[in-house]
Amino acid sequence: HDIGYWLLAHEYPGDLAKAVEMAMKERIPLPEAEIRVIGASHAQVGAYLLGLWGLPQPVVDAVAHHHSPQSA
């Protein structure tokens, strides 16, 4: 479910590092920091990628909301 994290780490390592630092410094959830720094969370990126690959919508939704399952 963290495939989006790997993609962000590969494509935007500096920005992801800034997001991790922000999350720790401000004591906020990492996805929130990712959105503020990068414009999308690793969950959103992962869900988008899985959608492009044609995975079933319930799987895409599970990845998209794995940090907030009540939203799924």
Image (cartoon, grey):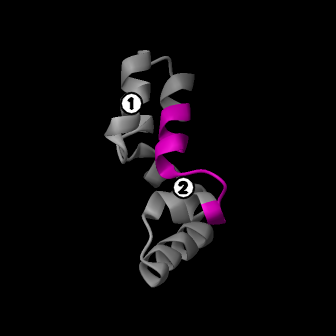
Asked if residue 41 lies in the magenta stretch, the reply is yes
Q: How far apart are marks 2 and 1 (CA)?
A: 23 Å
2 vs 1, front mark: 1
Tag 2's secondary structure? helix
Q: In this view, does 66 lie to the left or right of 30?
A: left
Residue drawn where x is 55% and y is 61% of the image: 34
Residue 52 in view? yes
Residue drawn where x is 53% and y is 42% of the image: 44
Residue found at the very far front of the displayed protein: 70
Tag 1's secondary structure? loop
List x then y, in percent, for residue 67: 36, 48
Q: What secondary structure predominates along the stretch shown in magenta?
A: helix
Instruction: Find disc 2 in the rendering and name its residue.
Output: 8
Residue 20 lies, with reference to residue 57, above or below; the image says: below
Q: In this view, does 15 lie to the left or right of 28?
A: right
Residue found at the very far bottom of the displayed protein: 25
Tell me which segment is drawn in magenta.
Answer: 36-48
Label number found at residue 72: 1
Residue 9 in view? no
